[in-house]
Image (cartoon, rainbow, N blue to C red):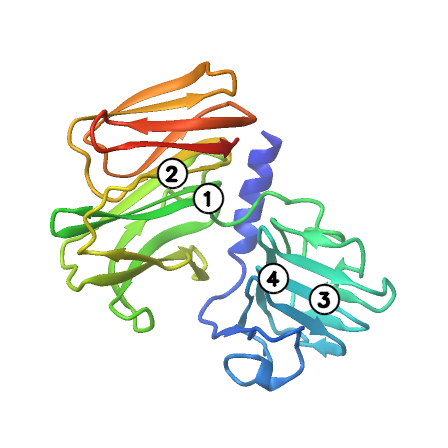
């Protein structure tokens, strides 16, 4: 009950921030990018009040001065590293900072390095903040209250051939403040158009939500897809880009594990039955399922932990086995 209350509060707090904001993304530079230099951002200017600021994975942004936005709000998404070396960020009370899995906030001086949201000092140079976590004006110092409450956590995103159409599937867990999803397609990987939308479940606590969209107007040999996730407050983020080759004829099954689940991806429909077995190191079959006319993304939930082998077979052209860690 306590966790449910925290998730509800988090949803309300995330909804405070207004969203018709420009998105400004830090550019990847070696060894690091400095916040205060215009050329280090894709909009060729520093972040300003009202922006959604994105620090991509693999990118380190260093704050070295006192950047004070007054009552102006920022929405900061950290997939890479935000590093403070004698610098400060001060922003309005409607601001939010999200540190995603793999993201990091780090500093060198507990007296100088800090982040303020309104009158709250939410970071003071130490300890390091690792994702997934978020902070706003009420979460307190140290990012210690809502460590698991991110708007949406994606489990999987896959593409499959369905006759002349393309089946787009994705799954999520722990949705908070989620409004919906837009499916976007490109023929070249750079120019995108929205081809459909799906309403989100809204809020869920560690349950698996599965979504799909069938692109019946797909044309071209190689197509690119991505999902645009939109929060109730209008903020949005993208999944990684996936590609599909319409001329590919192989039925290679992809197998991977995440969060106590085995994820299977069938690029084309397999006629008949497919046997899926999870096998322990001693050869004992711990879980077995039979799938009929398998297509696209299939999720096998399991409470197993440790190293296992997943075997997928239809006793004909599909015979594959992959070791996974649950």
Q: Nearer the viewer, mark 1 or mark 3?
A: 3
Residue 230 image position (x, y, % from top left): 40, 57
Q: Is residue 46 above or below residue 90?
A: below
Q: Nearer the viewer, mark 4 or mark 1?
A: 4
Q: Is residue 95 above or below residue 247?
A: below
Earlier in the chain: of badge 1 and badge 3, it is: 3
Within 10 Å of the Cα at label 4, are there few (<14), some (14-19), or many (20+) other Cα atoms?
Answer: many
Residue 14 image position (x, y, % from top left): 54, 55
Quadrant for residue 290, please give it: top left
From the image, tell me which residue sits under label 1: 175
Residue 116 image position (x, y, % from top left): 73, 65
From the image, tell me which residue sits under label 2: 209
From the image, tell me which residue sits under label 4: 80
- Tell me how far mark 2 sits from mark 1, CA to CA: 9 Å
- Tell me how far mark 4 sits from mark 3, CA to CA: 10 Å
| Marks 2 & 3, CB-CB < 8 Å contact | no
From the image, tell me which residue sits under label 3: 83
| Marks 2 & 1, CB-CB < 8 Å contact | yes
Horizontal arrangement in the rendering, residue 59 relative to residue 166 (left or right):
right
Quadrant for residue 156, please give it: top left
Q: Residue at x 71, y 53 (%)?
A: 129
- Tell me how far mark 2 sits from mark 3, CA to CA: 35 Å
Earlier in the chain: of badge 2 and badge 1, it is: 1
- Tell me how far mark 4 sits from mark 2, CA to CA: 27 Å
């Amino acid at each position: 009950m306590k966790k449910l209350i925290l998730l509800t509060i988090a949803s309300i707090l995330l909804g405070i921030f207004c969203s018709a904001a420009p998105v400004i993304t830090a550019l990847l530079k070696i060894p690091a990018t400095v916040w205060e230099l215009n050329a280090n951002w894709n909009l060729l200017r520093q972040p300003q009040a009202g922006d959604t600021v994105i620090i991509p994975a693999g990118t380190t942004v260093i704050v070295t001065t006192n950047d004070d936005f007054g009552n102006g709000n920022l929405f900061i998404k950290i997939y890479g590293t935000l590093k403070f070396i004698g610098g400060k960020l001060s922003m309005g009370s409607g601001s939010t900072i999200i540190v995603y899995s793999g993201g990091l906030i780090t500093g060198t001086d507990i007296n100088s390095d800090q982040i303020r949201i309104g009158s709250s000092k939410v970071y003071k140079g130490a300890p390091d903040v690792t994702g997934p976590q978020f902070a706003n004006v009420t979460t307190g110092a140290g990012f210690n209250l809502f460590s698991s409450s991110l708007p949406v956590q994606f489990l999987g995103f896959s593409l499959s051939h369905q006759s002349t159409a393309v089946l787009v599937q994705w799954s999520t867990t722990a949705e908070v403040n989620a409004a919906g999803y837009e499916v976007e397609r490109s023929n070249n990987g750079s120019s995108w158009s929205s081809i459909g939308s799906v309403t989100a479940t809204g809020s869920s606590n560690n349950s698996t939500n599965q979504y799909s969209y069938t692109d019946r107007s797909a044309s071209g040999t190689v197509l690119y897809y991505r999902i645009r996730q939109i929060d109730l407050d209008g903020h949005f983020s993208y999944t990684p880009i996936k590609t599909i080759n319409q001329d590919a004829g192989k039925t290679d099954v992809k197998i991977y594990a995440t969060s106590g689940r085995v994820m299977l991806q069938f690029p084309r429909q397999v006629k008949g039955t497919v046997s899926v077995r999870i096998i322990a190191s001693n050869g004992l079959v711990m879980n077995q399922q039979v799938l009929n006319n398998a297509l696209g993304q299939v999720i096998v939930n399991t409470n197993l932990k440790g190293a296992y082998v997943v075997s997928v077979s239809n006793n004909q052209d599909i015979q594959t086995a992959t070791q996974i860690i649950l």
